[in-house]
Image: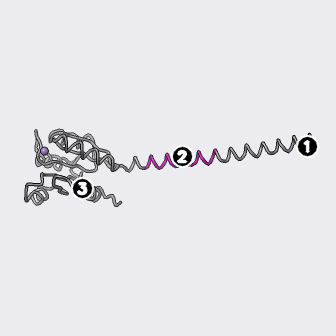
């Protein structure tokens, strides 16, 4: 009986060791998962969306967030210029037809400010207006998109502007 007891005690120790090893492995996996999540958050690109139309704004911001971007929203040109400074976005999506200050003037102010001048700006105008692309690029926009927005194309352009090759 004494022998059997010793054998059982030995088994108990091994069982405990095995449980501990498994626990350490789970902890290590959890840590690496957390590290990956943290890195993803660090690499997240921030977009400043300047759009006065509430429906466009909601639709676009929701889709951009779902696509893994951080999104800051300005509802007119004046707020767009302010938030370009305070939010330091990686890219600005700017509707050109805006109240307070229109997109053309807002873009000029952002590009003229040394603090925000290097931020790429993508101008957006309604589909109907021909020649907007040329006008926008000539005015110093880094990219141009027409509305309604082709989302896949928009993402491609944003990734090019932010130097993200995915
Ligand atoms: Mn508008």
Dominant secondary structure (helix, strand or loop) of the stretch shown in magenta: helix
Q: CA distance from mark 3 to mark 1?
A: 75 Å
Say which quadrant the C terminus sits in: bottom left
Secondary structure under tag 1 reads helix
Instruction: Locate residue 64, reporting x and y percent.
Output: 29, 48
Q: Quadrant of residue 127?
A: bottom left
Q: Which mark is residue 115?
A: none
Say which quadrant the N terminus sits in: top right
Instruction: Locate residue 139, reporting x and y percent.
Output: 11, 55
For disc 3, the marked residue is 154
N-term-proximal mark, 3 vs 1: 1
Secondary structure under tag 2 reads helix
* Tag in front: 3 or 2: 3
| Ligand 1: quadrant of the figure | top left
What residue is at 54 percent from the left and 46 percent from the top?
A: 31
Pick whichever, 128 or 105, lies toward us.
128
Pick whichever, 46 or 20, lies toward us.
20
Magenta-drawn segment: 23-39
For disc 2, the marked residue is 31
Report the side of 28 relative to 67 (left or right): right
Identify whether 57 is placed above or below 129: above
* Tag in front: 1 or 2: 1
What residue is at 33 percent from the left and 50 percent from the top?
A: 67
For disc 1, the marked residue is 3
For mark 3, does the 10 Å Cα neighbourhood hold few (<14), some (14 to 19), or many (20 or more) residues? some
For mark 2, does the 10 Å Cα neighbourhood hold few (<14), some (14 to 19), or many (20 or more) residues? few
N-term-proximal mark, 1 vs 2: 1
The reply to whether the magenta stretch includes residue 32 is yes
Instruction: Locate residue 85, reporting x and y percent.
Output: 24, 42
């Amino acid at each position: 009986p004494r022998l059997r007891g010793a054998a059982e005690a030995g088994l108990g120790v091994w069982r405990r060791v095995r449980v501990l090893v498994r626990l350490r492995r789970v902890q290590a996996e959890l840590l690496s998962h957390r590290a990956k999540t943290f890195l993803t958050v660090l690499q997240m690109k921030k977009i400043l969306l300047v759009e006065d139309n509430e429906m466009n704004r909601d639709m676009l911001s929701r889709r951009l967030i779902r696509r893994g971007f951080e999104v800051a929203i300005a509802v007119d040109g004046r707020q767009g210029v302010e938030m370009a400074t305070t939010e330091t976005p990686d890219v600005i999506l700017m509707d050109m037809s805006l109240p307070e200050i229109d997109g053309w003037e807002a873009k000029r102010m952002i590009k003229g400010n040394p603090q925000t001048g290097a931020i790429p700006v993508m101008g957006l105008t309604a589909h109907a207006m021909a020649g907007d692309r040329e006008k926008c690029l000539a005015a110093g926009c880094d990219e141009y998109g027409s509305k309604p927005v082709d989302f896949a194309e928009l993402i491609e352009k944003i990734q090019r502007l932010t130097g993200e090759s995915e």
